[in-house]
């Protein structure tokens, strides 16, 4: 079977620049990812093209799973102690507050994360990236926010990985975040990135948010106060669920796999 023909990076760069330039020239500010962002090839096929079916949320919630504080063990927030050995890579702490658009804390919110390991490999049968699987790192965790809306995870910094969108395509290092409201029908999914990543300018998924200020809200900040002496680096990333400054989500990008 012949290998698929992939567009060179120069063509992807030109497409991204043309789209961003057109919106800037027109004075249009788009704070949400575009569903049909041409440089992100599969976005043209993965987003809905037909009318959505209306569903009664109360009926769904009668059958949806539920959880409480006793269902989430505090140890689930530490992804470095889930196996018998130490995972490989840079140990780090990621923490922040979950708030609404008025700055009020979202208390006792279920926050889940999943990520690649330090080599850029997911523990998933569909991930065929030829990087090592770390037997001591599964890459998933969860916690509940406290009374002031804070969450905190201890994990390993993920590596970048190729994703076959175009020739020599690499995703910036990132962590997937999922948050639930009071029911599973209120789920929000997004991604957190790391500051100074050289792949930002080359990544169509990140660049599908054409507003630079909105993109910046997906990037965590290094926090030396969170960093632990001789143990772990620290990053802070706050999540805003509503309002004009809310954190961008994957609902619009349909990026469930990357």
Image (cartoon, rainbow, N blue to C red):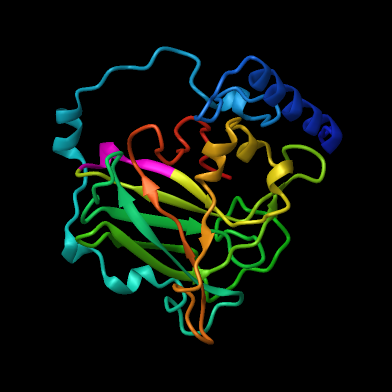
Q: Is residue 97 above or below residue 59?
A: below
Does the magenta segment cover residue 143?
no
- Region in magenta: 183-189
Left or right relative to 57: residue 233: right
Quarter of the image for residue 167 reads: top right
**Closer to the camera in the image, 238 or 111:** 238
Instruction: Kindly tell me whether residue 231 is visible in this rendering.
Output: yes
Q: Which quadrant is home to the C terminus?
A: top right
Instruction: Kindly tell me whether residue 3 is visible in this rendering.
Output: no
**Closer to the camera in the image, 12 or 50:** 12
Q: Is residue 172 above or below residue 63?
A: below
Q: Which quadrant is home to the N terminus?
A: top right
Q: Whole-percent x and y of residue 64?
A: 21, 41
Left or right relative to 22: residue 255: left
Name of the residue lying farthest toward the bottom: 230
Which residue is drawn at the image coordinates 26% and 70% (left, top)?
A: 73
Left or right relative to 164: residue 48: left
Quarter of the image for residue 102 reads: top left
Q: Whole-percent x and y of residue 126?
A: 60, 50
Which residue is drawn at the image coordinates 52% and 24% (left, top)?
A: 47
Which residue is drawn at the image coordinates 57% and 60% (left, top)?
A: 116
Q: Whole-percent x and y of residue 87?
A: 55, 78
Quarter of the image for residue 148 reads: bottom left
Q: Is residue 144 above or below residue 172?
A: below
Left or right relative to 154: residue 16: right
């Amino acid at each position: 079977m012949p290998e698929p023909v992939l567009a060179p990076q120069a063509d992807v760069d030109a497409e991204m620049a043309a789209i961003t330039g057109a919106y800037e020239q027109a004075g249009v500010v788009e704070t949400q990812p575009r569903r049909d962002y041409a440089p992100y090839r599969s976005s043209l096929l993965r987003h809905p093209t037909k009318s959505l079916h209306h569903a009664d949320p109360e009926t769904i919630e009668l059958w949806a799973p539920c959880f409480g504080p006793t269902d989430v063990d505090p140890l689930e927030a530490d992804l470095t102690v889930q196996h018998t050995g130490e995972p490989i890579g840079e140990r780090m702490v990621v923490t922040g507050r979950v708030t609404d658009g008025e700055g009020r804390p979202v208390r006792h919110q279920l926050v889940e994360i999943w990520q690649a390991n330090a080599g850029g490999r997911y523990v998933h049968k569909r991930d065929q990236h030829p990087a090592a699987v770390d037997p001591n790192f599964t890459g998933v965790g969860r916690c509940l926010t406290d009374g002031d809306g804070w969450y905190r995870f201890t994990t390993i910094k993920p590596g970048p990985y190729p994703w076959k969108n175009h020739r020599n395509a690499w995703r910036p290092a990132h962590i997937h975040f999922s948050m639930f409201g009071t029911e599973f029908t209120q789920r929000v999914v997004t991604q957190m990135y790391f500051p100074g990543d050289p792949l930002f300018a080359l990544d169509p998924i990140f660049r599908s948010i054409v507003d630079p200020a909105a993109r910046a809200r997906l990037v965590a900040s290094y926090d030396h106060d969170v960093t632990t002496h001789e143990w772990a680096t620290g990053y802070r990333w706050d999540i805003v669920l509503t309002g004009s400054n809310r954190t961008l989500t994957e609902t619009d990008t349909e990026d469930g796999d990357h």
